[in-house]
Image (cartoon, rainbow, N blue to C red):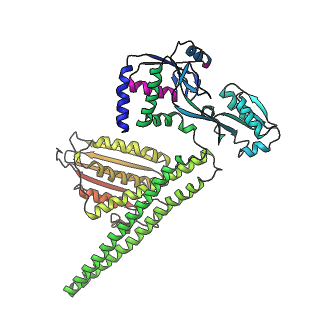
Amino acid sequence: MRYFILLALLISSSFHSSAQYHIMFSDNYPPYNYLNEEGQLVGFNIDILKAIDELYDSDIFISGGHWNVINEKLKSEKIHAIGGFNYPGSPAKEFIFTRSAINTSHCFLYNSDHIKNFSLEYLRTQKKPLVALWKNDVLIHYVLSINPSTEFLFFNNYQDLILSLDRKDVSCIISQRVGSKFYAEKLNKDYIEATEHRILERNMGFKVSEDSQELATLLNNGLEVLLANGEYQKIHDKWIADYNRGRNDWRKYIRVILITSALFLILILLLITLNRILQIRVRNRTKDLQEQLEVNSNIMFQLEKQKTRAEENDKFKSAFLANMSHEIRTPMNGIIGFAELLKSDDNSHAEQKHFVGIIQKSGYRMLDTINNIIDISKLESGVETPKYDIVNLAGMMQELQNFFNNEAKVKELTLIFNEQLIVPVEFYTDEYKLNSILTNLIKNAIKFTQKGYVEVSYTITEAMAEFIVKDTGIGIPTEKQASIFDEFVQADFSHSNGFEGSGLGLSISKGYAKLLKGDISMESEINKGTKFSVRIPNNNIKVG
């Protein structure tokens, strides 16, 4: 039914498309309507009217001026309406007031560097508190009803009103909430806080000449449409929402917390699934060993070797789960701990922003762990298949260099990309899997290199692409090199102590190289560095 109503409103607007209306706004009432630094009339009310004008193609002319001047123009019928008008307490015969576009209110604002927690009780108990405000009898009577000994400072502009809070003798100010917070931000006064106690709430809309009944109808209908189609909320979020939130508005953080909780639940399910897969694998291998023992006792040596390998896999599983437990607990401790800190009212805005940054960083770390588990699970289950298409290998290498430059600079490492040979050719492979292989190798090289350089060399021919990632890092012990590509195996848990990671990157890289009909090899010397070589053939299959 709502859509039929909207359609009827749109059809009715066509009868007024030839009309031209002139609507004016105050040019000094931010963020509702004001002149920006370029001298343009902007703000919430301006965007609302422009949206209505675009909706009906009504040819509305918008301009700004001093409040007293534009009111005189409306009285003398030189314009058709005024926008951003706070409704009076009683109707006026010569004017039409449209439905409310937005609700405004006043509140107390205070300097949090001078007063830790301002409240009505604080104002009530002060001896001769000094309160700054625009001269308004309603607000003056309200404050005197709280504390009859209150003294006042009067200002006629927002900037001076906000600046008065730098005076230690000023207890607080009373001002229009959104406008005051706009100026506080503009003046970089992040220590100015607003109370949630709101007073003198008023509705703001359009004041229309009595002779412009069609314009009043158009504005009312337009506001109804904007509220229904979601455009009103977009404009409100753009101009008003940030200034109308409380000090500890959980809407800033609830999305981060919900996403983190969802990721945690997904990770638990993945770990349970992976544990089940590993248990089935161990059970099946043990069963195979038992069957072979029953068939032929002459191959006992081989069976014993297979049994030992199965037991080692079980140990690897336990080590992997222990490592995953660490990889989960570490970011989750950060998420839970700093989410708990966000509950406190004593944190500054900068501290809250820092806490959210830590929560986000921990979430990204958990996401990397989840992605690795998903990739290795696909490889283990055999459902992963390559998707071949033309790949711009030179462009990919440039993107990798740009991506890792900053990470290398942070560790004061030299990151070198050497283009040894590039033959212009259409190269077909799976871009995601090749990018994943190189990303894992370069990331590991930077992670395990404390000083020196990381060098990436590459050669591209018609038949083959070869990539070499060389570093001057800690190296891999000789006895560990044979198993470095096995699933769930790190080179040495004690050897790599202090380095974050699930230990799945090289296993995934080996699996992807095999899927792409290529190979990956490694040379390493302890405390001197490691070199990985990757060879990927050109799978010259054109994708239709």
Quadrant where the N terminus lies?
A: top left
Q: Residue 287 in the image: x percent, y percent? A: 26, 80
User: Residue 326, percent across and down?
Assistant: 47, 64
Q: Nearer the viewer, residue 29 or 333?
A: 29
339 versus 350 height, above or below = below
Q: How many marks?
A: 0
479 horizontally vs 157: left or right: left
Within the image, what quadrant is residue 84 found in? top right
512 left or right of 139?
Answer: left
The boundaries of the magenta stretch are 44-67
Residue 299 is one of the magenta-drawn residues: no
Q: Image quadrant of residue 526?
A: bottom left
Depth check: give the residue in front, 484 or 126.
126
Residue 66 forms part of the magenta stretch: yes
Q: Is residue 466 above or below residue 377?
A: above
Which residue shows up at 40% across the image and 72% down it? Answer: 318
Residue 399: image location, x then y, percent? 36, 42
Q: Residue furthest front?
A: 93
Position of 76 relative to 263 (above/below): above
- The C terminus, quarter of image: top left
Asked if one can make out residue 226 in the rendered structure from this viewpoint, the answer is: yes
Can residue 36 be seen in this snapshot? no
Which residue is found at the position 30% from the left and 47% from the top? Answer: 458
Query: Which residue: 48% across, 52% down?
Result: 451
